[in-house]
Image: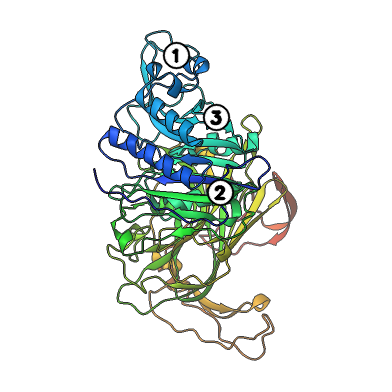
Amino acid sequence: MKSSAIIFLCLIGLSSQRSTPEDNSYVAAVVAYELQSNSATNLQNYMNIIGDAAEQNADIIVFPELAISNRETVVVPINGLLKEHPIPALQPELFGEVLVSISSAARHHQIYVVINVQEFLNCTIEATGENCPENKNYVFNTNVVFDRAGAVIDRYRKINLFGEVNRTATLTPDLGIFTTDFGITFGHFICFDIMYQVPAVQVVLKYNVTDVIFTTKWYSEMPYLTAVQIQEAYAYVMNVNFLGAGANNVRVGNGGSGIYSGKAGALVSIMPGISTTKLLVSRVPKVPGQVEGDYPGPMNDGPLVLDSLVLRSDPSLPSYVTRLIKPGLEEFTLIDKDVVCRFKIHMSERHSDTKYTYRAGAFSGVRSYIGEATGGSRVCSVFACTGNNIDTCGKRFPRFSSNTTAVFEELTITATVPTPKPNTDLSANSATYFPLSLDKTIKPLKPEYFNFNSVSFFDSLSIYTLKLVKSAPDLYSFAIWGREYTTDDEEISPPREHVEGADDSSGIYSGKAGALVSIMPGISTTKLLVSRVPKVPGQVEGDYPGPMNDGPLVLDSLVLRSDPSLPSYVTRLIKPGLEEFTLIDKDVVCRFKIHMSERHSDTAPYYRAL
């Protein structure tokens, strides 16, 4: 057996009594577990860890996905034998070793226990209370919940599998939900489920649960979907307490566990650089976000140690509309189909031979999840790259070095997107938007570093704003990341041709007075633009350089993209003369008054009103 360390966190205010419905909080434990090759060893480790959690007065403990064994299966007859004999510890001859052992530990230590197993269902014989569409054997990815008496009180089968070719998705999409004796009702689901409307959104909105359990063996991906990053963002947006237990194997990118409380962020979390076993314990307020007293907070292995953690890269980044970010203050807009991203960025570089570059990106489309599934996404983001090419983005340098990241003194992202529509059948919205960030610890910024808010107009457009409120010197990414569930399973969006010439506009502007000096080059060159700037925007006095023109013939060399959404517009061809007319698209009413005359030319453009 490999050596493993159990970390005990000293907690202020823990009593020797278990929590009650009248208490304002309860004590939760999650296990960041390094899977051992021997199933018996794993089971014994589980038993020991349950005892350790009980000694710290934990009311509930959560273990990761598939951490007892990747090979052996467990029968969980919750609609059969367990109805008559719900406590396996009292009838060991009727049940397998895993159920009996965990039941015994839960009963002995008077603690709720959540484990994840490979569940076996034999549909070649009568299976009481089970849905058996075919006469065959099934294997499921399953959470099993035990109460303090050791009784099995809930079973949840994973709905959204991730590359699990030997397992079957649940045959009936039942949600995982159970109620405790300390007054909390938990929803629970497994790993890749968090990416989907059902169950991740539905279980919270339909049943108004405030506490969620998450068993996982997560494969982390930059710049948005590292484990602790998405766990904390889910807790923030759904405003729930979130208990995430992750399996640890840094060599393949597994790792990341924590306990989070709504918009208060991580009560305790870890993103490991070394494969090990750690027990994380914290008191959890029953009202998410209402945190009082001291909490362990994020635990850091250090950026050098984190070099060992394998991280994948988001394969959809080449499909983004992007712009290379330059040092200094910039304001600009990027548009991709129905996503409009507005950026205000003040960035400065640090002195280092090796530096990250940064891009702003806009995306509306469908991405791949490592070839296992496709899902809709709408994104406005800033992310780090190891070079100038888009293919270098969403990656780290092989070895950590200080001063390689830029310093963001100011960073505001505004995303204008279609308003998520409610699905009354599912009791869930059609999209969810998350504030995501990542720094050198491979964890998100603490909530006090940013503001995130949204406003909707006419039930058709929503504006999400993510603003950095403290200087951040170690950012890998900062994003409004939306999951658009309605385009799941569609073909992935193709990569774009990234032409840097399209980014080469520069200028100094002053409010409604316009350009003090600006250039749109037709020849790739370097030019220094200098202008006096009034402290009150728009109150310009004296002479200013104004726009600098390369001339229309020279500008033929400038590559320009076309807005891909134009075919979706309501349009009208404009004719010479005076016209007045109205165009309407949904809740947008456009009134035009146009007097146009053509000039004599063999080649003349046509004009349309949109």
What residue appears at the point 54 percent right and 34 percent down from the top-left corner?
198
Q: Is residue 194 above or below residue 359?
A: above
- The picture places residue 410, in percent across and down from the top left corner, at 54, 72
What residue appears at the point 45 percent right and 52 percent down from the top-left corner?
228
- The picture places residue 284, in percent across and down from the top left corner, at 57, 49
Query: What residue sits right under mark 2 in the picture?
Result: 235
Front residue of 168 and 91 = 91
State whether residue 175 appears in this view.
yes
- The picture places residue 179, in percent across and down from the top left corner, at 60, 33
State whether residue 159 appears in this view.
no
Q: Are circles 3 and 1 on residues that touch, CB within 8 Å?
A: no
Tell me the tag on residue 175: 3
Which sits earlier in the primary sequence, circle 2 or circle 1? 1
Q: In 3D space, how far apart are the residues under numbered discs 3 and 1 (Cα atoms)? A: 19 Å
Q: Residues within 10 Å of mark 2 (few under 14, many from 20)?
A: many
Quadrant containing the N terminus in the rendered view:
top left
**As shown in the figure, which amino acid type bears the numbered disc 3?**
Leu
- Tell me which corner region of the image, top left, top right, bottom left or bottom right, holds residue 323: bottom left
Which sits earlier in the primary sequence, circle 3 or circle 2? 3
Q: Could you tell whether 253 is left or right of 22 in the image?
A: left
**As shown in the figure, which amino acid type bears the numbered disc 1?**
Cys
Secondary structure, mark 3, is loop
Secondary structure, mark 2, is helix
Q: Are circles 3 and 2 on residues that touch, CB within 8 Å?
A: no
Q: Residues within 10 Å of mark 3 (few under 14, many from 20)?
A: many
Q: In 3D space, how far apart are the residues under numbered discs 3 and 2 (Cα atoms)? A: 18 Å
Q: Could you tell whether 97 is left or right of 438 in the image?
A: left
Query: What residue sits right under mark 1 in the picture?
Result: 132
**As shown in the figure, which amino acid type bears the numbered disc 2?**
Ala
Q: Could you tell whether 91 is left or right of 14 in the image?
A: left
